[in-house]
Image (cartoon, grey):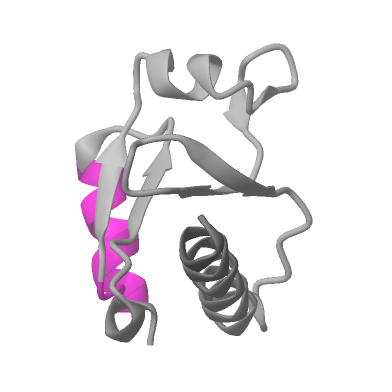
Amino acid sequence: GVEDIGAVILGASVDDLEAQQKFKDEYNLPFDLLADHDKILSEAYGVLAFGGMIAKRVTFIIDPAGRVAHVMDDVSVGSHDQDVIELISRLKAETTSETMQE
C-alpha cells in the first residue's frame, strides 16, 4: 500500500467531525480524515465548487519539504489507490535520479 512506500494519507472534506467519523467507520478507512467545516483548507487549495458548498475530489501529493509535487484532479475511485502508489513511486524515482546527477 501507500504506507509501504513511505507516504502518509490524510483525507479532508467540508463535513463536520461527526459526519467524518461516520463516513470513516462506514467505509472502514485506514487513514485519518480532517474536518474542514470552516472551508479554510479547501479554499486555500482551490477545491471549492458550487459556490463554495462542496469540495471537489482532488488528491494532492505533497513532498517531504511540504511542496505540492503533483495534483490529481481526475480521481477514479476504483483505481485511485493504485494510481497514487504508481505516481509516488515514479516521483520518488525521479527525485532519486536528480539527486544522483548533482
Residue at 47% in and 60% down: 99
Residue at 22% in and 54% down: 21
Q: Nearer the viewer, residue 72 or 49?
A: 72
Query: Where, quadrant-wise, is the N terminus in this rendering?
Result: bottom left
Which quarter of the figure has residue 38? top left
Q: Nearer the viewer, residue 77 or 91?
A: 91
Going by the image, does 48 lie left or right of 40? right
Q: Nearer the viewer, residue 3 or 67?
A: 67
Residue at 66% in and 38% down: 56
Estimate the x, y position of residue 101 in percent, counting from the top left: 56, 63
Estimate the x, y position of residue 27 in percent, counting from the top left: 37, 75
Residue range highlighted in magenta: 18-30
Which quarter of the figure has residue 90? bottom right
Going by the image, does 82 lie left or right of 20? right
Residue 13, visible in the rendered structure: yes
Question: From the viewer's perspective, is residue 88 above or below residue 12?
Answer: below
Residue at 54% in and 74% down: 93
Estimate the x, y position of residue 74 in percent, counting from the top left: 78, 56
